[in-house]
Amino acid sequence: MNKRDDFEYTLKDIFSLVLQLRENGTLEHGRDFKALLSCENPELHSFLYANARAVTEDRFGKKVYLRGLIEFSNFCKNDCFYCGLRAGNKKLERFRLTETEILDSCESGYAIGARTFVLQSGEDGFYTDDIICGIVSSIKKKYPDCAVTLSLGEKSKQSYLRFFEAGADRYLLRQESSYPEYYMRLHPAAMSCEKRLQCLWDLKEIGYQVGTGFMVDSPYQTVQDIITELDFMKQFEPQMVGLGPFISHCDTPFSTFPDGSADLTLRVISAVRLMLPDALIPATTALGSISEDCRTSAFASGANVVMVNVSPVFSREKYAIYDNKADTSFEELRRNIASLGLELEISRGDHKNFTQLNSARK
Ligand code: SAH
């Protein structure tokens, strides 16, 4: 293929790009991705989603992996422009869960079938490494058949190593952006893209199953920025990829920006599925917050994980990353998943390359 920069793609060309991406896990040119992601033809969208779903079923059958999500602190020292938990948001009522409350949340999660607990928080210095290690080892002791996923933000490699030694299996840290110029449009000068990426490489080197990801259609983001993130993830090869539309929060510097497009998010999910066929990709709460149908559509577009909030009810509305965050019941999620002919899987749901490694570690 020798395409000039001004090459005009026909719809037929773009359909064949979907097949190429499925076949090769990548496309030859950045402009191919641009053509694919920018195409507004509904039939092309359906074709992309169907191919992504087919690859998902090749690898995972009809299973959707269940995770119990515990949002245990909304204190944060950072000031990310998009996030409602930012330190500068003085209107937010802050909370912290105790170890007992976290273990009780695990119990609720276990009861509905979750065999992975995801512990997420703002960057809260109250929880020292000793406290986190204590919580992780208590959970692993009480639930030896379960995986623990941490999502606590940026820490030193030493801290990540200690959490891993205490039994943590996985770590979610979206890169947000791997391109410094765009990263700085989302974050204050005190934060850095290099540091974020270093954290990801550290986590990988330690042996975690690592989750990356980014917000789709966030302020100032171009299609080229999305392609940059796809390139980064192709290179990094994360085991998990979290993708949700940007949703504005009224008490942040980005309050006046419109919510991101759910359709574009679904297309990005499908593209990531075709690039990383074995990845664990959640149908995110951000999609569910646009509408529950959008979250359900994510499963038909290549997502294969659902996170159910098992945090105590009193704290849920305080974990307000963005406005109108969905708090959908387990029963409703299960019904929606069943409506697609898919079924919830009761197991840890590790990434394929890690099943043996994990059993070797224990
Ligand atoms: N402190 C942890 C957890 C952050 S919250 C960390 O740094 O990883 C989890 C994710 O929510 C973030 O990574 C971000 O991508 C997403 N998020 C934050 N604000 C958002 C918004 N306004 N709209 C959509 N997603 C948002």
Image (cartoon, rainbow, N blue to C red):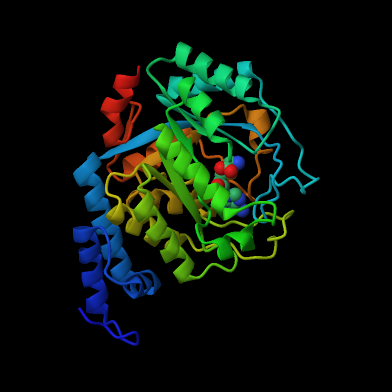
Q: Position of residue 296 (x, y in %)?
A: 40, 49
Looking at the image, which residue is at 69% across and 40% down? 76
> Front-most of 351 and 66?
351
How many marks the image carries: the answer is: 0
Q: Position of residue 124 (x, y in %)?
A: 68, 34
Classify residue 318 by image quadrant. Answer: top right
Classify residue 189 by image quadrant. Answer: bottom right
Relative vertical location of residue 58 with respect to residue 125 in this rendering, above or below: below
Relative vertical location of residue 239 with respect to residue 249 in this rendering, above or below: above
Looking at the image, which residue is at 33% across and 31% down? 349
> Front-most of 123 and 207?
207
Q: Position of residue 333 (x, y in %)?
A: 43, 39
Q: Position of residue 82 (x, y in %)?
A: 64, 55
Indicate left or right for 225 with 25 as reference.
right
Relative vertical location of residue 143 with respect to residue 281 in this rendering, above or below: above
Looking at the image, which residue is at 61% across and 26% down? 312
Q: Residue furthest top?
A: 141
Does residue 359 appear anywhere in the picture?
yes
Looking at the image, which residue is at 33% across and 32% down? 350
Does residue 114 appear anywhere in the picture?
no
